[in-house]
Image: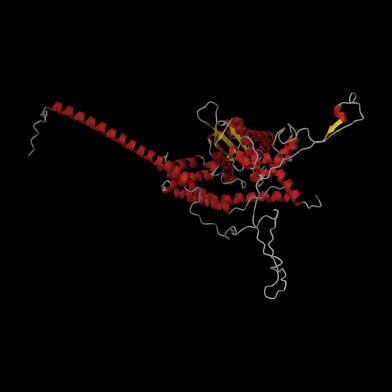
Amino acid sequence: MDAAPPPDDPPRPTDVPTLQGMVRDLTARNRFLERRVVELETQVVTLEAKVAELDGQLDALLKHRFGRRSERRTPTPRPPGPPPRRDEHGRSPLPPHLERRDTTHDLTDAQKPCPRCGTLRPCIGEQVTEQLDLEPVTFFVRRTIKRTYACRSCDPAAVPADERIATAGPSQVGPIAKGLCGPGLLAHAVTAKFADHTPIHRLAGQLARSGVTVARSTLTDWLGGAADLLTPLCQLMTERLLLSRVVHADDTPVKLRVPKATKAKASHLWVAVGDADFPYVAFDFTADHSAAGPTAFFQGFQGFLQADALAQYETLFGAGKATHVCCVAHARRKFVAAADGGDGRANAAVELFGRLYAIERGLPPLLPPSDDPAERTARRAREAERQRLRQRDADPILAELKAWLDAMRPSALPKSALGTAIGYALNNWAALTRYRDEGYLAIDNNLAERTLRAVALGRNNWGVFGSESGGRTAATLYSVVGTCKHLGIDPFAYLRDTLPGLFALGEKPTAEQLLDWLPDRWLLRTRENTSRPASAA
């Protein structure tokens, strides 16, 4: 039996038209609520994806700030063969070229006789202990004396002074005309700022502790003068670098102080590293992050350009232009980030990338350039062998990776860490696998990234470029110091020799005059002089 309605419940209609109208209203309301539920479910899915994306970004930032910096994962099995030789442990011997200063301990005359029988004991040996020591930096004043000679027999009224009087030495003493700094101090300032990442105010403090007071503005002017001297040489280095078969390129942001602005703007330093035939490092400065910088720098270059998939590089590629070789390590890092963010599906891709790198470690090393025809033939044969081994061993792994990416793409949210990694790899697949085309190509762009570490370390110390001219100065000096590091040269030794040499060439040196001061030429000349017997010298 139906329960009686509550007393306040209004009476229900009994006529059919009214009931039909109520059914229509309830049906429409039900449809509206169903659509609203679908909309809310879609919003929930979107918000969950956004939360997952933000969680991944937060985890990545926390890992970048506080986590380990190594990219090493679980080691992959090595190919069969003898295990690689590990570095030997223990103290390495001190360099033989260092000066030895002896401190000798000897018995007194009263201690030399035998306390038992009184016989004089002869010396039967020595115990030598070597320690590495140093003295503080020593400053000295370099005096350049130019003697002047004049003829007293000629009539000064009849004979011009330039014929009667002769002064020895150059007209100006370098490396900076009328400058207080000698070549060693200028080389030290450049090396301290751009190789050791010491900001100007700390460098001034170091000099002051040695009793030498130099204003920060003066040090800045010295660095600008050094850059002016080195600019023609850097231009020649860049011209030769662009003759390379392959160039590694990358960029990094640097803050630029803008007059009357409330905050600094983002400028960029771009780096290019040539191949073994043209082993130079060239930096370029741009006040923005547009494509104009790399377009102007790489104008006319038609070789392989190993770089990330940066939009600013896109105008460089095409018929009659450069060929893009994308960085496999850059793609791999995205999957590592996804795996570290908790998406275990990314581990499969990381493992495949590890197998690709295991193949690279097993390849025979590249041979250095040579003018000898037989060695050039051997070099080309080695490159062909590397290409053959890569295509034989890496192609099956790349095919497996491509199939995995295609299969996983529909199930990965596009904006998630895994979806972003998959999209990046598939969108750049042709460029990512192009390293197999030539044996002299590298699997990644880590060479350029390592070169940029100097800027990253320095940026943490000096912080900001004071002006666009300061950015161009930094690009020039980073180019020289970076090339020295790339070739294993001590930047101080090179600059101490090169700066006065360039000053002696005058304001407009020719390319032929500059060739001998290229870092690789200087290195060969230095080695020849070092290995030459003293009698021959």
Q: Nearer the viewer, residue 306 or 152?
A: 152
Q: Nearer the viewer, residue 41 or 405?
A: 41
In the rendered view, does 23 fall on the left or right side of 407? Answer: left
Q: Nearer the viewer, residue 458 or 167?
A: 167
Q: Residue furthest right?
A: 153
- Which quadrant of the rendered structure holds the N terminus? top left
Q: Residue at x 60, y 43 (%)?
A: 196
Q: Residue furthest top?
A: 157
Q: Nearer the viewer, residue 331 or 185?
A: 185
Image-quadrant location for residue 300: top right
Q: Would residue 518 be seen by someone viewing this image from the given angle?
A: no
Q: Would residue 377 be seen by someone viewing this image from the given angle?
A: yes
Percent from the top left, x then y, of residue 303?
63, 39
Percent from the top left, x then y, of residue 176?
71, 34
Percent from the top left, x then y, of residue 473?
63, 34
Up the image or down, 302 lies above or below 74; here it is: above
Up the image or down, 14 lies above or below 116; here it is: above
Up the image or down, 229 lies above or below 374; here it is: above
In the rendered view, does 404 fall on the left or right side of 141? Answer: left
Q: How is the image coloured?
A: secondary structure
Q: Residue furthest front?
A: 110
In the rendered view, does 356 fall on the left or right side of 135? Answer: left
Q: How many marks?
A: 0
Image-quadrant location for residue 462: top right
Percent from the top left, x then y, of residue 46?
36, 37
